[in-house]
Amino acid sequence: MDPIVVEATRGGVVEARHRAHGVAVREGEIVARAGDPALVAFFRSSAKPIQALPVVRARPDLDEAEIAIACASHLHRPEQLEPVRSLLAKAPATEDELECGPDPTRLEHNCSGKHAAMLALCRARGWPSEGYRLPEHPCQRTMLAEVAAAAEVDPEAIPTAADGCGVVTFALTLERMAHAFSRLASLDGGALVAAAMCAYPELIRGPLAADTMLMQACPGWVAKGGAEGLLCAASPDGLGIALKVEDGNTRAVRSSLAAFLGQLGVGTGELGAVPVENSRGDVVGELRPTSKLHLPQIEKSD
């Protein structure tokens, strides 16, 4: 039950170590674990596919690219901003109504797709757009209820806080996050969300990101990363995964995820190969899970 350890090497010397906790859930049962499945963390941006559910139910006019960008933490590349603009136009809403803050602009903020989707939901439900990010607004009360229902947790028992983009984020155990993702495709609107993410993995984040790379390497999987070293994913046959780097360092996500999924027999291509480069672009080391002699710490249930 020990966590996976990812080493950062430079010139053959181990310079840092990161511990990662992972859990896999199917039909409400833990089927594999590494570290502590009861570890509590904030869902952060990994919740976006679940937060998109009430939007797709209320707005059947959205296309797959618009649904995907609602689930995304994009890199404000031109091809990623286009569906944000389209989603705003359909809402209808303006960039000035986005309450994610400038980073560097409201449109270019990596959560602008989610915020545009929330404005579209407000328009569909007749709610005021002002303050849609705040806990007392019906939009955020809806998001809490949606996450609670997906994770099958009492909403009153979920600690909440302000996310990096200003909306509400939700604290759950890794096991409940994995459970929620295992159920995603079966939830009302979930098949549409999963299909959109599978169709446009490059919109979800971008090159070298763990979630985008996993979906590209494993057709049918959906995956979404979150701040502080979190990633949640689901296989086409209902296996839910939640993985959290204990110190919050995102650089260890790819290696630890590849190691965890590898023990489950899931091939992930180049996901786990993470070079360490200097400012010249020279490869000077790598991020790697510790020797396979230690990886059987991942326990599978019968």
Image: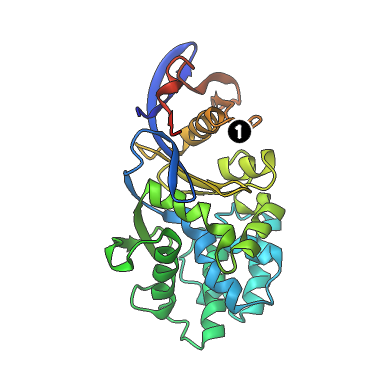
Q: Residue furthest bottom?
A: 126
Of 133 and 290, the residue lying toward us: 290
- Tell me: residue 102, above or below residue 61: above
- Tell me: residue 78, above or below residue 19: below
* Kind of element beneath mark 1: loop
* Residue 58 visible to an observer of this rendering: yes
Of 275 and 199, the residue lying toward us: 199
Q: Bin the neighbour count of mark 1 within 10 Å (Cα to Cα): few under 14, some 14-19, many 20 and up.
A: few
Residue at image location 39% in from the left, 68% down from the top = 144
In this picture, residue 145 sits left or right of residue 160: right
Give, as a three-letter code, the residue at label 1: Val
Across and down, in percent, residue 25 comes to 47, 45
Q: Residue furthest top?
A: 12
* Residue 106 visible to an observer of this rendering: no
Across and down, in percent, residue 118 comes to 52, 73
Label 1 sits on residue: 266
Residue at image location 42% in from the left, 18% down from the top = 294
In this picture, residue 300 sits left or right of residue 116: left
- Tell me: residue 152, above or below residue 224: below
Residue at image location 47% in from the left, 86% down from the top = 127
For the image, the number of numbered tags is 1
Across and down, in percent, residue 178 comes to 46, 48
Q: Residue furthest front?
A: 302
In which quadrant of the rendered view does residue 23 lie? top left
